[in-house]
Image (tube, rainbow, N blue to C red):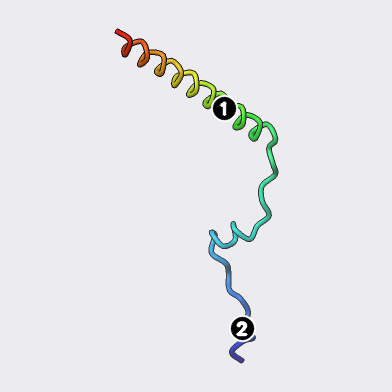
Amino acid sequence: MLGRRRPGPLPRRVAALLAPPPPHRRWLVVATAALVVLSVWAANDGVLDLHQLIEHAQTR
């Protein structure tokens, strides 16, 4: 019968998608969030310094 064939072995990628997700690592999420916050703070500080430098150059 056409619709009653048994499924063959799954390719590795399909099996990986169907497998349960790996266990959550809370410390990894916290470390990533801390790195993002630090990066945003550093970028903001750099933008403010650049803005002050441009204003100082325009007043001369």
Residue at (66%, 47%) from the top-left corner?
Answer: 22
Q: Position of residue 13 (x, y in %)?
A: 54, 59
**Quarter location, residue 37:** top right
Position of 24 compared to 58: left or right? Answer: right
The residue nearer to you, when weighing 28 against 44, is: 44
Residue density around tag 2, few if under 14, some if 14–19, many if 20 or more, within 10 Å: few
Question: Can you tell which mark lies on residue 5?
Answer: 2
Q: In the figure, 54 relative to 39: above or below?
A: above
Position of 51 compared to 5: left or right? Answer: left
Going by the numbered disc 1, the residue's amino acid type is Leu
Question: Can you tell which mark lies on residue 6?
Answer: none
Residue at (37%, 14%) from the top-left corner?
Answer: 55
The residue nearer to you, when weighing 57 against 48, is: 57
Location of the N terminus by quadrant is bottom right
At mark 1, the secondary structure is helix
**Quarter location, residue 29:** top right
Q: In the figure, 14 relative to 50: above or below?
A: below
Q: Which residue is mark 1?
A: 35
